[in-house]
Amino acid sequence: MAQAAVSPDSPALPLTAGRGFTPASVLKFLVQRRETPVVVVTVLAIIYFGLRTSAIFEVANIIATTQYMGPILVIGAGEVLMLVLAEIDLSAGQVYLTAPWFVYWFWHAGVPVGFAIVISLLLCATIGLTNGLITVLLGVPSLIVTLGMQFLLYGVVLVVSSYTQEEIPGSGTFATIFGAGAWADLLWGSGIVVAIWFLLKHTRFGLHVTATGGNTLAAAEAGIRVARVKVWCFMIIATASGFIGILDLIRFESMDPGDYGLNIVLGPIVAAVIGGTALTGGRATVVGTFVGALFLAVVEDGLNLIGMSANDFYLFEGIIILGLMILNVQLRRVAFRYRR
Amino acid sequence: MSAPSPDTILRTEGITKRFGAVVALRGVDMHLERGEVLGLVGDNGAGKSTFVKILCGFQPPDDGRIFVEGRQVHFHSVKDARAVGIETVYQDLALVPQLTVYENLFLNRELTSLGRVGVLSRRRMRHLAEQYLDNIKVHMPDLNAEVESLSGGQRQAVAVARATRLNAKILLLDEPLAAMGAKESALIMDLVKDLARQGVSMIVIDHNYAHLFALCDRLNVIQQGKITVDTRVADTSVEELTELMVSSFRRQLEAGQKALEEG
């Protein structure tokens, strides 16, 4: 994990600084990386639960954990794009839940399943477009816009489904590739996360996203179309969330209209934030979000395996998140002093 | 007053601006030579900032004409002014603190490969940024450093460098030495002098006479919407200028009192 945290544009790689590894340079490097706290606690969590129970390293358990991670990873990477812009998308979880319903409705109406998936993804993109346009053109804060969208989509699902659960027949190569295969979630999820990481860190568009979130006025002055950049990001997160939702539908083979999107979207946002992404815009780490999602998955899985009750679980998760965020913020202060 | 020469890069004639009943500018005639650093002095409300807003295209004058390199220009927006090479440099407003020095220098003019995908060519940008900064003798400790970690002077230098790299011929600098220590000020002063030597013309707005005397070749004093004094820095002194401003203030005060008494 520590290796993965080193991106080519690291501000102060000890190697490139030409001083080699000294304890001081390594410490300085670690303090400056936004991902350090989450990487450290994730490693500690794995060691702790590994010592408590060897079940955590069993393949079946690892597969279950990665399947749990899929949506957190993908929606989390999407939220990174939002948070860089100092925006947020609370509807992503409901989009994740609604996209499978789109597929089901089209499929039920006789549309071939592959085609139904494409149309559904286009609908998800349109939901993102709507979120984005209301935010940038009408000036409503994205927190409220996407909260409204969350309720709206939830309502659509409840009304159209007449509140009945549906079963989806899923089998064959198609289903194996798209979700039902044991590692499908992790592979697709990682693929999308890597794509978003590359987009943000290594393309012109990504630089414009960071610039727009860091100093909107300066970005606009330089000729960047900041409104367009934002709308694109709303569309990316909605489409990615819908995509991973469809994958999970094919895996679960059934859907419950009562599933509630807000319960899903908070995990990814927590993963992004404990990973080192700032809520104030301009600073983000997709790598940290990846580790953040892994951390949440390990803790949930580990507490389950050592037989903790559901009530104790929430207690622990709350304490862990608070502690980690305090550590994050305090370490930022130390890092700021180091830079001068 | 010194007369405009063929080397005049920017000239204004009778610039007038009213805001309702208030006349902010009443016929400003100004000229700026190539490679010259001109200081604008004046009390708050004298019309300095209104004049600068007109020059950078932010608002149009009610009357009067602007000439850039001898040709009359009409600005409808900041873009129009930028197109003929006039750029306003704000130290903090122009930069993205979370991006590196070279990313800021190339903002929205990034070098990319792979066509429409637009993969950033970081190495090339860094290399060209280094060359350019070397050219204008700006020494940055680390081009990979985020602008946020730079000092005020270094930020100002990056903002100026970005403007000139994009072919700005005339820079409008608003308090370029504000809140800077001696070392920082020296950095900016050297940069301003170097750029002037390379033919960039600058207009500096500042309240601090010491700053203006250190930076400028020539000073224009704006009082009540008109340029009342046009002097080379070498021909005047901080004391003389202070006395001038104070005495005019005193005259205004007396005139006001008189008007009140005659009521």
Image (cartoon, coloured by chain):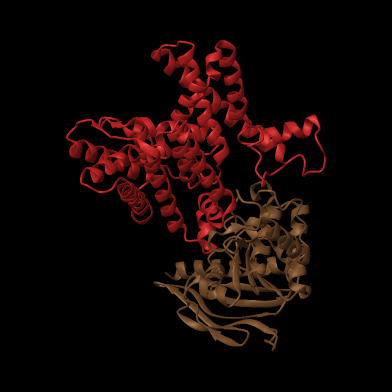
Image: A286 above or below B53? above
Please name the residue shown 45% across and 15% down the image: A304
- Figure quadrant of the C terminus of chain B: bottom left
Q: Where is residue B9 drawn, in percent x and y?
A: 65, 82
Please name the residue shown 63% across and 37% down the image: A5
Palette colour of chain B: brown
Q: Where is residue A53 drawn, in percent x and y?
A: 55, 12
Furthest-left residue in view?
A162
Q: Where is residue B244 drawn, in percent x and y?
A: 67, 70
Position of B160 compared to A180: left or right? right
Please name the residue shown 65% across and 72% down the image: B167
Position of B77 compared to B178: left or right? left
Image: A76 above or below B81? above
Q: Quadrant of residue B106?
A: bottom right
Can residue B198 be seen here? yes
In this orientation, which residue lies closer to the viewer: B170 or B99? B99
Furthest-front residue in view?
A172
Position of A182 compared to A19: left or right? left
Can residue A90 be seen here? no
In this orientation, which residue lies closer to the viewer: A268 or A208? A268
In this orientation, which residue lies closer to the viewer: B138 or A298? A298
Please name the residue shown 74% across and 57% down the image: B185
Palette colour of chain A: red
- Figure quadrant of the N terminus of chain B: bottom right
Q: How many marks?
A: 0
Image: A64 above or below B136? above
Q: Where is residue A14 drawn, in percent x and y?
A: 76, 39
Image: A179 above or below A45? below
